[in-house]
Amino acid sequence: MDHIIEVNHVQKTFGKEQALRDLTFGVKKGDIFGFLGPSGAGKTTTIEILTGQQVPTSGEARVFGVPSKDMHHPHYLKRIGVMSDSSGLYERLSIRDNLLLFCELYDQPSTQVEEVLEIVNLTAEKNKRVSKLSKGMKQRTMLARALLHQPDLLFLDEPTGALDPANAQHIHHGLRTLNERGTTIFLTTHDMNEAETLCSTVAFLDKGSIQLLDCPKKLRKQFGDGHLMVGLTDGREIMLPNEPASAEKIYQWMKNSEVETIEMNTPTLGDIFVEVTGRNLV
Amino acid sequence: MTFSMKRIYAIFQKDLKELYRNLFVSSTIILPIMMAFMMSQAEGVTTASVTLVITLSFAAVGTFVQSAMIAEEKEKNTLRSLMMSPASTLDIMAGKSLVTFVMTLATLIVSLLIVGYSIQEPVWMTGMLLLLLVFYITLGTLIGLLTRTLIEASVVLMPILLLFGMNVTFESLMVSYEFLSFLEYLPNYQIQLFIDDLGQRISLKPAFIIGVWTIMTLIVTIGVYKKKFTR
Ligand SMILES: Nc1ncnc2c1ncn2[C@@H]1O[C@H](COP(=O)(O)OP(=O)(O)OP(=O)(O)O)[C@@H](O)[C@H]1O
Ligand SMILES: [Mg+2]
């Protein structure tokens, strides 16, 4: 059993509304686990259950073997880091003062502040007041705060939602480094590229339960139809089965310098999601 | 529930820094100080005017600052971040109460100096004032727990100021309207009786009534907290 997150038949209802119908999955230590699903699928609710902010209506969730009802204990909270849009910052304080407060609360040396500011690329802005920051800067500050105490497990609810590509990439790099040092990461995202490049495992959540769970590369191969897509200089795009008979055609085009692109016709994660659920990933 | 001086102090420092930059809340100290100036212009210091300065300081600073800090933490979702850290609710509330305590005490001392009140029976007086202050700060905590935004907390301040912050008008009201005689039992009226008697004796009845108010408010606040915050 090397799953650090175990979710078994979890149901969650809010009044009449059923947010999670029957959720069962596990996350391995060392994973970067991407939790994907359309808006309202129950991603945030799942994170709230795993971080002790909500209890399941029925079923069982355990993280590091800790059951939901014990997740508010400091010994659990010290091991996890959480970032979501409902984690607020002190607007009248600077980035640095916000982080220093949490350094004290987590019993960390104040040198950690510089360390995490580096990861989120905010070193130059550290003395700015939070009220004066852009949305993306606030998001990066929240991420920095989640990293301060070097948690074993990070929960990130749409960590790069408000970021430009350059900063998203910088964060991805930081997250990979953390992961290499042993941090397990659980993240939700609507960005299929992010899921594909960053995650070692992805799960598709729809209608309150997991529809599919695997490594993105495998999924793409599995859902691929084994065709090649050849783009020619005259603008045509031709699909060919990946078999010896196609070699002859390609050979001819290549000889005439007509080939512009050749790629495997593998579906994107977004395509796969539509195929599995019959719905668009919004 | 755990308790850590280091975390309490960290929250204390944070809240002090925030208040310093939050004029909407911190400017409330002007109210009792202005009242003290007005009272000092009048002839002779009466018990009623001293009491007014005390209760106004406690309600406008003690109750309001405490409720505003808590309500704003909820409004801005920062309370959630704190609760996700190893800080316990006890740490958080203690840190805030300490800030409120220091601010209220400073306001009170300045106001009393302006009025020119010389304390009789300093030990008893200090004890009573501390007990009364615990009541006002707990009341602020309760309001902070029940309101959702800073604005809501400041709206609630109005009736609180009328009921618990003033007392000069009570006597005439009680004479005119019998059904208002319950006002006599308000802690802010009882402290006036206590101070009135100080020259001759230490009255234990007001001390007892204020103690009951404090304990009742504490019980209600803890109850509300448990209902709202424990899973
Ligand atoms: N506190 C709550 N009270 C009532 N209903 C809720 C609550 N939290 C979530 N829900 C409902 O549960 C469902 C799942 O919500 P959730 O926030 O988990 O979705 P999500 O997958 O995070 O969506 P998004 O991608 O838009 O963030 C929604 O239908 C939502 O209305
Ligand atoms: Mg969400």
Image (cartoon, grey):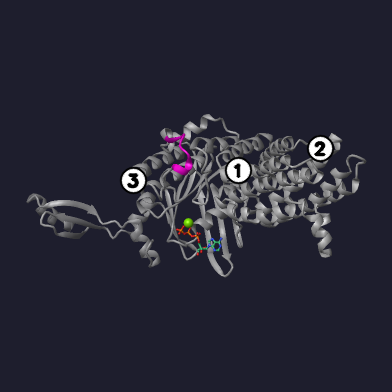
**In front of the other: label 1 or label 2?**
1
Front in this rendered view, residue A141 or B75: B75
Q: Amino acid at mark 3?
A: Pro
The residue tagged with tag 3: helix, strand or loop?
helix
Residue sitting at x 89%, y 44%: B197
- Quadrant showing the C terminus of chain A: bottom left
Q: Amino acid at mark 1?
A: Ser
Q: Amino acid at mark 2?
A: Thr
Query: In this rendering, do the residues under marks 3 and 2 share a single chain?
Result: no
Chain of the residue displaying label 1: B
The residue tagged with tag 2: helix, strand or loop?
helix
Mark 2, residue position: B126
Asked if the stretch drawn in magenta spans residue A3, the answer is: no
Chain of the residue displaying label 2: B
Give the number of the disc on residue A165.
Answer: 3
Mark 1, residue position: B27
Image-based side of A116 in relation to A173, left or right: right
